[in-house]
Amino acid sequence: MIPYSTQTIDDEDIDAVKNILRSPFLTCGPTVSDFEEQTASYVNAGYAVAVNSCTSALHIAMMALGVTDSDRVFVSAISFVASANCARFLGADVDFIDTDKFTGNLDVNHLEQMLIDAEKQNRLPKVVVAVHLSGRPVDLQRIYELKIKYGFYLIEDAAHALGAIYKGHKIGDCFFSDITVLSFHPVKIITTAEGGMCLTNDETLYRKMKLYSSHGIEHDKQFLINKDMPNFYYEMQSLGYNYRMSDVHAALGISQLSRIDDFLSKRRELAKEWEELLSSDKNLTLPVADSNDSVSSWHLYQVGIPFGKRDFVYNTLRHRGICVQVHYLPIYKHPYYQSIKNYPSLPGAEYFFERTLSLPLYPKLKKLDLQMCAATLLGLIDEKKL
């Protein structure tokens, strides 16, 4: 079976984890801080908070921005459900931004119209969550201009996009946004087995997220409310969660981060190979190629299949041992969100979902296997005259 994605683990990663298992600290040790500092340095961000999942990162990001049940949050319609659930955890109303029908990234024109309508209703969103789907950056410049005009906070959901570049800025440097979140799930650009991270340039947001990630407890004397206390003293200053990352996971992350440029180079090489092999078939819609302004991390290679044929292609390829995947059902179509309110259909998101198929792409994918996958897909399309 050829998966659509999988982790790339080598002996250095295994040794890094072994070293922590032999150390005094399996958790709450110095390795997590090292991982935070190295990741922040890699993307040129001021601060980083490592946590146990990207969902946890999204949750504490929303908390730090002060989202409550009286607020409204706008979210890209095409994404994993956690991109919206983080607002629902806090009781906020969620509305969905339509997406470009070819890229799946949010449609900035639709976002602008939503903001115009929301201003008339006196119900502007507190936060907009912009998802860099498949690793391709959204148009952050235009969204930033809307952020300034309408006064919302911006979270970049960069679960797919560590290593991507937009107009010379590494995704994660928060030049255009308040907070960026990352995922270190095994299929992502680098992995900590499970894990996530919040990045920001705002020290106040950083301090809040740090507290929320660890029970709301403060140990640092300079930030204690009660200053003149014994050294053993710590205090819970807010209601937080046990979202900490362990030193074991962080050690794996540091080892992986040291090879991220190799991972990215291989992903981009394989994406180019896919493009060369599939570009001759006009039945397929290929993902937008990189440009001077936008360089994808190529977490996913998503092609568009002719309308009504995607599920047949999906099932047939899987039956033949090629584990393609679909990313994603529009979030508002899930039964939970349907139970909240009658969300309108969004034409761009619907078009993208009905045709999208994620093909195998990961650093250790062999070119011969990729070529076999491409030949199988092209042969299937030609055979069925899709």
Image: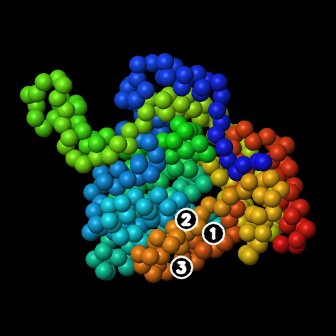
- Badge 1 crowding class, 10 Å Cα cut-off, few under 14, some 14 to 19, many 20 or more, is many
- The spot of residue 380 in percent (x, y) is 86, 64
Residue at 41% from the left image edge and 19% from the top image edge = 24
Q: Earlier in the sequence, mark 3 or mark 2?
A: 2
Rendered image: mark on residue 353: 1
Whether residues under marks 3 and 2 lie with C-beta atoms below 8 angstroms apart, the answer is no
Q: Which residue is mark 2?
A: 78
State whether residue 284 appears in this view.
no
Q: Which residue is mark 3?
A: 345
Amino acid beneath label 1: Phe
Q: Quadrant of the C terminus?
A: bottom right
- The spot of residue 81 in percent (x, y) is 50, 61
Query: In the displayed structure, would residue 67 be above or below residue 386?
Result: above
Whether residues under marks 2 and 1 lie with C-beta atoms below 8 angstroms apart, the answer is yes
Residue at 53% from the left image edge and 59% from the top image edge = 80
**Measured Cα–Cα span from mark 3 to mark 1:** 12 Å
The part of the image, by quadrant, that contains residue 339 is: bottom left
Residue at 65% from the left image edge and 28% from the top image edge = 10
Amino acid beneath label 3: Ser
